[in-house]
Image: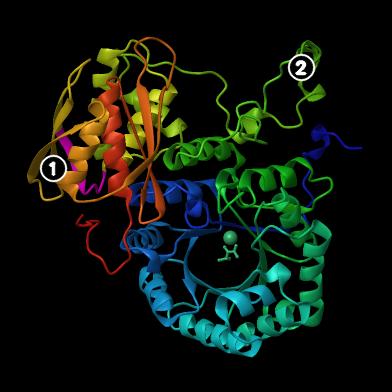
């Protein structure tokens, strides 16, 4: 049995596996995880630095925001391919094509369900009709780019002969990557691996033309990572995954788990990726902070407890030799060795270094704003921790491209009085609008006034508040989840004044509401 210390010699014959990150698309489909333009843009930049081969940046037909994000990201990234998702519908493909056509390395990812249950109940189409639709759509997408991926949705539950037929047809139509998703996380590793070997055996054209087979696994049974690895053991050369495993329902295969399994057990798995593992931890934190999806403490690789040793026997073993209880070195995934604390005497340079270590890219203009916010905070509290700096950075990303900004507010509240709030918001043209309302407490009154000003009617589903660090001068974080037209949207804000944080969190959620591409602004008239 090998140990982690035996893995340093990499075989020259390792097969290169492409990492296709869909945090910004499938990951963003996690309920409540909607990201705004600036947040998507920053995550995409960090994914490129992490070394992913493909970033699926969004589903351009679904909203103007997604369209703009995919477009901007495809023009920004230098080495990473940027994909936009489209159903087999001409306007979807045109929208995805428009979004990526000026990018440096662009892909259109077209999908259509092929399994019996989806054919009969969702699409109400015969298999032959689906094959025709898929082929036409791939050919349509090829008008925009030579890099076209096709996914037979619910592929793992599709009859194998049908999977082969649709794969052959879309390759003929010009698809260069075929992704076979385990859409509902139902497959077992042996079954999923067999699908790949079978399709390859039946279609020699795959290897002849250098077509890439790809896995895309959901985690409903907790098998997403195991299934992804089974796929590459059977000929897949691309894995689709997300940071922290976020995604629809139980999520997608977690990028960090796949990469660290391949690295740590390279004595068993002869595969290499381009991932710079030292960037895993900062990107994980950023995705968790910006999506509001907290990483469970015991999550493999990036959870708070992943490298914590509680029992005396374990601690004793660790002191004698780390390898007794640690199969990976936390340093290799970028876990900071010690927590650095800044304060009001820390300069701009120290702040900049810390910001970079936390995994953010900031230009000088952004650094100015972050520095101002840091100074203001450092005047209010003695020690400024990483969590405080992340909060400042997240708020700066949040505040870019906002439709509504808080100008000021005033509340009147107390025991035996009706709570009232006067709120003034600034719209994107700079014009101020004011309204006042009463409510069950000062926060409710503020929320009512905001709804009156913006005209956006939402239901408040969740409201949470916590201190982000220790100490009585800690900043309060408020996170809210609202529902707008059956879609859950989240907002978060920080302040040493918790009512101000509550008001800004609510406004952040309203600013995140995405409307279909055709609609110009998120306004519902009540
Ligand atoms: O899970 C799935 O089938 C998908 C497809 C769009 C690839 O996300
Ligand atoms: Zn999926």
Residue 470 colored magenta?
no
The answer to whether residue 84 of the structure is visible from this angle is yes
Tag 2 residue: 318
Q: Nearer the viewer, mark 2 or mark 1?
A: 1
The answer to whether residue 115 of the structure is visible from this angle is no
Whichever of labels 2 and 1 marks the residue nearer the N terminus, that label is 2
Distance between the alpha carbons at the discs numbered 2 and 1: 56 Å
Q: Which residues are magenta?
A: 400-407
Q: Residue at x 41, y 10 (%)?
A: 471
Residue 246 vs 332, above or below: the answer is below
Residue 225 vs 161, above or below: the answer is above
Percent across and percent down for residue 318 are 76, 17
- Is 377 displayed left or right of 478 in the figure? left
- The image quadrant where one finds the N terminus is top right
Q: Camera-side residue: 430 or 158?
A: 158
Q: Camera-side residue: 488 or 128?
A: 488
Q: Residue at x 26, y 29 (%)?
A: 440
Can you name the residue that lies furthest to the right here? 1
Tag 1 residue: 426
SS type, badge 2: helix
Percent across and percent down for residue 502 are 30, 30
Percent across and percent down for residue 91 are 39, 79
The answer to whether the residue bearing label 1 lies less than 8 angstroms from the nearest atom of ligand 1 is no
Residue 316 vs 444, above or below: the answer is above
Which quadrant of the picture is home to ligand 2?
A: bottom right
Q: Camera-side residue: 148 or 23?
A: 23
- The image quadrant where one finds the C terminus is bottom left
């Amino acid at each position: 049995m090998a140990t982690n210390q035996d893995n340093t010699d990499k075989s020259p014959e390792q097969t290169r596996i492409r990492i296709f990150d869909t945090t910004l698309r499938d990951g963003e489909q996690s309920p409540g995880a909607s990201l705004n333009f600036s947040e998507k843009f920053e995550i995409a930049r960090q994914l490129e630095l992490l070394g992913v081969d493909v970033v699926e940046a969004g589903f351009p037909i679904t909203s103007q925001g997604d369209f703009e994000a995919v477009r901007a990201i495809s023009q920004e990234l230098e080495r990473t391919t940027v994909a936009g998702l489209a159903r087999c519908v001409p306007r979807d493909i045109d929208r995805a094509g428009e979004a990526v056509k000026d990018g440096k390395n662009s892909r259109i990812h077209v999908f259509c369900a092929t399994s019996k249950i989806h054919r009969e109940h969702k699409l109400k189409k015969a298999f032959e009709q689906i094959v025709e639709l898929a082929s036409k759509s791939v050919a349509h997408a090829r008008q925009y780019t030579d890099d076209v991926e096709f996914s037979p949705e619910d592929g793992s539950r599709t009859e194998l002969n049908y999977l082969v037929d649709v794969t052959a047809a879309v390759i003929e139509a010009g698809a260069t990557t075929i992704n076979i998703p385990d859409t509902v996380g139902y497959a077992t590793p042996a079954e999923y691996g067999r699908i790949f070997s079978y399709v390859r055996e039946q279609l020699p054209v795959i290897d002849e033309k250098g077509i890439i087979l790809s896995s895309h696994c959901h985690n409903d049974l907790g098998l997403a990572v195991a299934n992804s690895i089974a796929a590459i053991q059977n000929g897949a050369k691309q894995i689709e995954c997300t940071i922290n495993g976020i995604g629809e329902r139980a999520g997608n295969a977690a990028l960090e788990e796949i990469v660290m399994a391949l690295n740590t057990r390279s004595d068993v798995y002869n595969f290499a990726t381009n991932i710079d593992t030292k960037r895993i931890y900062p990107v994980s934190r950023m995705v968790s902070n910006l999506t509001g999806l907290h990483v469970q403490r015991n999550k493999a690789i990036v959870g708070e407890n992943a490298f914590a040793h509680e029992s005396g026997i374990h601690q004793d073993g660790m002191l004698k030799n780390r390898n007794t209880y640690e199969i990976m070195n936390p340093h290799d995934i970028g876990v900071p060795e010690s927590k650095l604390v800044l304060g009001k005497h820390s300069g701009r340079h120290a702040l900049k270094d810390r910001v970079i270590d936390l995994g953010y890219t900031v230009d000088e203009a952004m650094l100015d704003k972050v520095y101002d916010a840091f100074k203001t905070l450092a005047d209010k509290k003695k020690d400024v921790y990483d969590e405080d700096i992340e909060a400042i950075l997240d708020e700066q990303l949040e505040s870019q491209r906002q439709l509504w900004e808080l100008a000021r507010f005033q509340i009147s509240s107390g025991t035996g009085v009706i709570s009232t709030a006067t709120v003034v918001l600034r719209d994107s043209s700079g014009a101020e609008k004011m309204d006042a309302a009463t409510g069950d407490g000062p926060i409710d009154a503020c929320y009512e006034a905001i709804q009156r000003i913006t005209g956006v009617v939402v239901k408040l589903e969740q409201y949470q508040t916590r201190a982000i660090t220790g100490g009585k001068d800690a900043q309060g974080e408020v996170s809210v989840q609202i529902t707008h037209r059956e879609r859950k949207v989240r907002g978060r804000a920080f302040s040493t004044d918790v009512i101000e944080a509550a008001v800004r969190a609510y406004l952040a959620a309203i600013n995140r509401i995405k409307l279909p591409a055709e609609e110009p602004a998120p306004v519902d008239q009540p």
